[in-house]
Amino acid sequence: MQSPKPPSRFFRQAAEAFRAGRLEEARTAYQKALNADPGDVDALVGQGVLLTMFGETDGALASYAAAIAKTGDLEARLNRANLLANLGRHDEALAGLDAAAVAAPGEANVAFNRAVVLAGMHRNGDAIAAFEAALALAPDSAVLHFHHGAALARALRPGDAIAAFDRVLALEPNQIEALCLKGFALVELGRHDAAVACYDAALALSPGVPQVREQRAWAQLQLCDWAAAEPVLRAAADSFAISPQATPAPPGLIAFADDPMLQAAATAAWLAGADLPAPMPGLAAPHPAGEKLRIAYASADFHAHATMYLLADVLAAHDRERVEVTLLSWGPRLDDEWRARAVAAADRFVEIGDMADSEVVALARDLAIDVAVDLKGATVHARPGLFTARLAPVQVNWLGHPGTMAGKGWDYLLADATLIPAGAAGYGEAIARLPGSYQPASGRYPAPLPRSARADHGLPDDAIVFAGFNQLWKLTAAVFEDWLAILAAVPNSVLWLWSDAPAARARLAAAAETAGVAADRLVFAASLPHVEHLARLGLADLALDTFPCTAHTTAADALGMGLPLVTRIGEGFPARVAASLATAAGAAELVADSAEAYRALAIALAGDADRRAAIAARLAAAPSLHDPAAFARHLEAAFAAMDAQARAGLPPADLAIAP
């Protein structure tokens, strides 16, 4: 057997210079090595690495290709595939790795790199299978288990992701990233105490990482641990406001900062850090005018989710003689009523969870989609790359993200005159204002609803019942102080709160006692199926809203069931949603403009049953809350106006849709 060829003198010089950081010297030495022997595979691979560092990617790819052609060198194959993937050329990277798998069967590094490329393409199912194949070759690889867990998390399988991260931590107990991603998955499952413990363990290993402190504070916020959470998040918000380019926005910024410019900057920073694709060439020309308008809604939430609670009846009410509806879904494939309703309401329901962004864009263009609607925006499990790559000539931000997307992939933001008044700053899209409210009207309140009595929920029959059913991350210390002041001013009253977390319940009860309000005046509600939740709302007398992030679906539920909701209006989008709904329903008197006015309004309404009844009657008859067909017509008119603007070759412009 022939011995390997010893490295050349020039190669040794290049390698030494490279290790010492003398990159120009290394470059010269690699070139000398290749001048002496153009087929020096080690020099070709080393030169490829160096050229990649210099940003000379074409030269690097050529070097790797020459090494592969010479001997099929595995390192060259892996480096070339990684570089192609980093350049967004995933199909070429995958083809190279497939060839490497044939050349080096059973090589774990090839299987691992192939799985990483598939994950980068959003082909989650294929990526998970590829990671599992790699783990069969290297079952004790903490790196493989970590990436497997990340892929499972992206596939919306947080329980399986936690198990994968536990395997990482069994192999490497001090793996901070695994602790943090496990914490994030625990938050997704509502296991906030366990998430805090993960973040505590990560901070014990590395106390100086602000993002970990902020993620822990976000979990603590949902446990009403305001003393620990709010100072961290407010300080992070202040730092971000001073230097949005250098400091990541804290999670849940909208829960405590009513500043539309700050919210826009946070979204812009999120987009900038997401490594999103540029528009793909070849956007299809519009199909002939007069044909059905082709609309695509894109979301991970076509199942039992707040988005579908709002949207289902409007989807079903679309005029199928005028529009063709495609739903692009990458969420969990849950076999539930809401998924079935989505499928029934669409002309076409497409599962895209295992498709690359480029494949989805190609599909949308083959279907000649006119208007693509992003129902996720900058929320968890969003796919903004679909919109920066351009699914359609017109792209709309609506419903999922409470504010601007602040980027070039979104042409319009659906709003209304209350939500975004004329002249409001901080929005990167043209504003299309619907009549009434931007939030869908619903006919989803079934009749008859399941019946229940106050006693079934631990509520006294003879008290005023205030309901606060917003998610607890929206409940700040200041808002809870308002609620306790209202309770103190209305002696025969209780506060009905939604929380399944014992730690949160204990903190809220302790805060009440500290403020001089007996803890037994707090009644805690458990999670129920949506229809049963709607039924129990009728047992309350008055709903109380949070601020600065007001109720969205929760407000629609309360107002739609005829339950007056006392809310407060602010400056930013999240602080105006409930005001939009109440105003459109003819109940603008429910909207306060300060904390003092909010308290006074709630106290006054608690003492005036006739006024509450009159408001409830108005809400029960409000078309803005109960006429999904009318809302669908407004929505279609907005999309048609956007389409006409694009067909005329004009840039997006603000629109006001007539009733």
Image (cartoon, grey):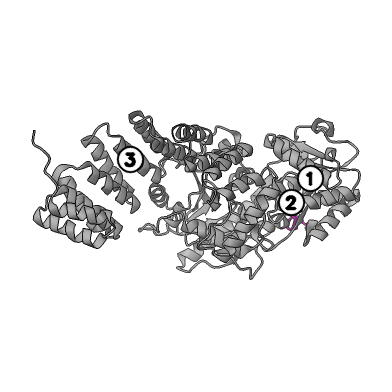
Percent across and percent down for residue 571 are: 68, 63
Q: Which of 213 and 9 is in front in this view?
A: 9
Left/right placement of residue 324 relative to residue 527 reads: left
Q: Going 75% across and 38% down the picture, which residue do you hit?
A: 506
Q: Going 85% across and 51% down the picture, which residue do you hit?
A: 486
Q: Nearer the viewer, residue 278 or 501?
A: 501
Quadrant in which the C terminus is drawn:
bottom right
Amino acid under label 2? Answer: Ala
Left/right placement of residue 12 relative to residue 620 reads: left
- Please rate how many residues cluster around mark 1, counting C-alpha atoms within 10 Å: few if below 14, some from 14 to 19, many from 20: some
Element carrying mark 1: helix
Identify the magenta region: 582-586
The answer to whether any part of residue 556 appears in the image is: no
Amino acid under label 1? Answer: Ala
Q: Mark 2 points at which residue?
A: 477
Amino acid under label 3? Answer: Arg
Q: Separation of disc 2 and disc 3 at Cα?
A: 48 Å
- Extreme residue toward the bottom, this view: 423
Q: Of circles 2 and 3, which is in front?
A: 2
Q: Separation of disc 3 and disc 1 at Cα?
A: 53 Å
Element carrying mark 2: helix
Magenta-colored segment: predominant secondary structure: helix
Question: Which mark is drawn over residue 511?
Answer: 1
CB atoms of marks 2 and 3 within 8 Å: no
